[in-house]
Amino acid sequence: MTLNLFDLTGKTAVIIGGNSTLGSVMGEALGAYGAKIAVVGRNAETSEAARSRIADKGGEAAVFQADATSKADLARVLSEVVAWSGSVDVLLNCPGRNSATPFFDITEEEWDGIMDVNLKGVVLACQVFGKHMIDQGRGGSIINISSVSSGPPLSKVFTYSASKAGVNSVTQFLAREFAPHNIRVNGIIPGFFPAEQNRKILSEERVKSILGHTPMNRFGAAEELQGAAVYLASEKASGFVTGTFLRVDGGFGAMTI
């Protein structure tokens, strides 16, 4: 007898930032295990490319255009997704914005922009889609993408680190808030992956420092996040797991000096 712990057939997963490097790859895995994937992004071209890749891996997906920092946009997407698939069972929050601006040079505009995307967007999505999950009464899973910089903070990315620390707090708060409704809220803490926002701030010296603090001595491949996403999305596999963080960081978080 085979235990099919990761079957997501009949589930719908909404991926905010589903057109991003990491979001789209996790979407491929969720789709391959049977979930219908709602790719939510601002850029129609990259969103369609993500949908196509999910389809190529055997998944069913559709594109929904939205600004993750707009509650009105997210509410509209919710109604469109429900009309398309009938339910929302998994919410994967992975929008991201980063900057290496030195602390004293950070403008209010940059601070607000990063906080809006990385933290406010997560809160708004949890309000909109979390409330729907409660109302539909069939439980669910919310997965927030955090970062190794969320604590202890990583040098040179002050605002990003602060925003991801906020994501961790939100994740644990909502795990308690939503538990009576059988909605699990967890986070994934990725190490260093070749996502677009990271490439822009990785100098040769920075790479050497990061790898020296990573026991596996390499960057992660985006596909190495797929198992964590499928595990946390599946009620059979992680039905008693909530308020926790799954590190996928090559051992970065286990290092001191």
Image: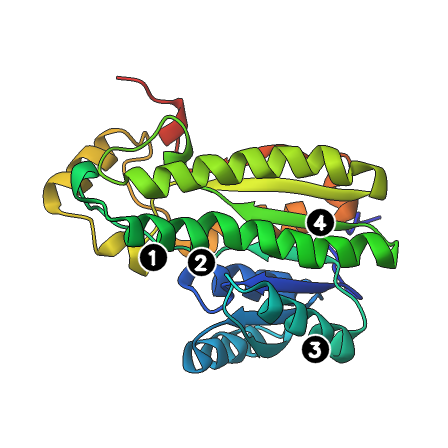
**What percent of the width, then of the height, locates residue 72?**
61, 68
> Mark 1 and mark 4: span between their CA atoms?
24 Å
The residue tagged 1 is 195
Report whether 208 appears left or right of 2: left
- Disc 3: CA contacts within 10 A as few (<14), some (14-19) or many (>=20): some
* Residue at figure coordinates x 60%, y 55% from the top left: 124
* Residue at figure coordinates x 70%, y 77% from the top left: 80
10 lies above or below 65 = above
Q: Amino acid at mark 2?
A: Leu
The residue tagged 3 is 80
> Can the viewer see residue 187?
yes
The residue tagged 4 is 141
The residue tagged 2 is 22
**What percent of the width, then of the height, locates residue 86?**
81, 72
* Residue at figure coordinates x 34%, y 57% from the top left: 195
Check disc 2 and report its element: helix, strand or loop.
helix
Q: Earlier in the sequence, mark 4 or mark 2?
A: 2
Q: Earlier in the sequence, mark 3 or mark 2?
A: 2
> Mark 4 and mark 2: span between their CA atoms?
18 Å
Q: Amino acid at mark 3?
A: Glu
29 lies above or below 118 = below
Q: Nearer the viewer, mark 1 or mark 3?
A: 3
Q: Residue furthest front?
A: 108
